[in-house]
Image (cartoon, rainbow, N blue to C red):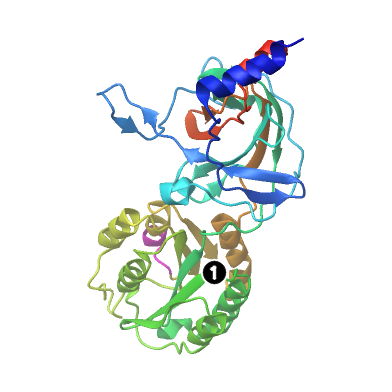
Amino acid sequence: MYLKPFCFFLAFSLFGTPVRAEEPETVVISPGREIQPAVPRPIPSNQGAGEMIEPGPMEPEMRPIGASGPDAGQMEAGPQLPDAGPRLPQAPVYNWNEAWHEKPVAILGIDITNFPEVMAVISLRKDLYTPVDDVRLNEIKVSEDEAPQQITSLAPCIPDRIPGDPLSIMFLIDASGSMQEYIDVVQSSASRFVDGFAEDDRAGVVAFSDHAVHTTPLTDNKDKVKTGLFEINPRGFTALYDSVDMGTRQLANCQGKKAIILVTDGKDDDGTGVPLSRATLEGVIEQARMWRIPIFAIGIGDEISLPALQSLARKTGGEFLFAPSGEDVDALYSIVARRLGRGDQGYYQLTYRTSQYEKDGTTRTIIVKYQGDAGAAQYPAPRNLFWPLSKVFD
């Protein structure tokens, strides 16, 4: 009869006033739901005491369907995900300073509102700018403090534009004399592309003919960008590589996603078949790779240097797109927009019921694995005021 009050008295006598763990900042993601920041956690290295390394590639636990080899095609296909998932307004990027957007697998946020149910928002990417949009349930593995967890649901989610994730674009527009027949559609297509920018997106313009000219510095003012595009007046020859050199330098220190959109109908040429630029193809490719700037090269007509444009695109993580005529340019800009992403692809809401159901306030580490890659983050478990004494009365 007196056991329970006595235990409460004993707890206060021995331990004093319980100290509550500091509550992490929370951000509302949907009515009645809150999401806690996912704390990036380096995975310990066994190379020395206290040394830490970022999560790296791990051995894949299954072979994807269509893979080559004796086991190809033998993996059981898991349930197909639904076409659309819940919308998560203002889903924040907690790991921005940890360059989450450069990782194949990243945990963006963790929600423990319904603990011991744990919900995580994850990002999956094939490469820097290509989201994964065809995940099967059995391709994802989750562990908490190294204990495997059973995923109860996995669905695409559609977060609004992610804070701190601006898009910085440099338009490199061929302004040589041969572009006269294409320039109107090139300007109009680029202008419509700019109209789709978010408020924090920025763009600049470099026009190149005999020289590369930085006509519009990076700005979030759409009207200034479009003015710079429509002021281009084709004449002269083609200093293509100098324009790429100028564009990469302008983007070098930009945060968030960045890319170059190059539009040309020719090759680097002074009119006699000799390269006009001081910069070289190999040099600008190395520069773009160093600063992680993909180049989306749009070639128009049949006078382009196909090998050069393909190298610029493929070796920097971008894409080469061919427009037989100027009328095709508008459709190619749509492809570039999808490749750059607008915060609505490659994001998934993953839910599991943790096997560590105790409300003990401990820090838990979640690791999500997908096809040999892994992302890690931590969250604080809820704290029961009298844990573990409360177990006496369960």
Residue 120 location, x and y as percent? 62, 37
Q: Is residue 253 left or right of residue 123?
A: left
Which picture quadrant has residue 388?
A: top right
| Residue 165 sits above or below residue 184 on the image | above
| Label total for image | 1
105 is within the stretch colored magenta: no
Amino acid at dot 1: Asp
Residue 21 location, x and y as percent? 53, 36
Asked if residue 63 can be seen in this view, the reply is no
Which picture quadrant has residue 245?
A: bottom left
Instruction: Name the quadrant of the N terminus.
Output: top right
What kind of secondary structure does the magenta stretch mostly adopt?
A: helix
Which picture quadrant has residue 311?
A: bottom left
Q: Which residues are magenta?
A: 304-309
Query: What residue lies at 54% left-to-right and 48% top-to-bottom?
Result: 130
Query: What residue lies at 34% left-to-right and 54% top-to-bottom?
Result: 289
Residue 330 location, x and y as percent? 62, 71
**Dot 1: element:** loop
Residue 375 location, x and y as percent? 49, 34
Query: Which residue is tagged 1?
Result: 200
Asked if residue 27 can be seen in this view, the reply is yes
Observer-nearest of 334 and 355: 355
| Residue 265 sits above or below residue 120 on the image | below
Observer-nearest of 46 and 246: 46
Observer-nearest of 372 and 360: 360
Instruction: Name the quadrant of the C terminus.
Output: top right
Observer-nearest of 150 and 299: 150
| Residue 51 sits above or below residue 269 on the image | above
Query: What residue lies at 60% left-to-right and 68% top-to-bottom?
Result: 198
Label 1: few (<14), some or many (≥20) within 10 Å? some
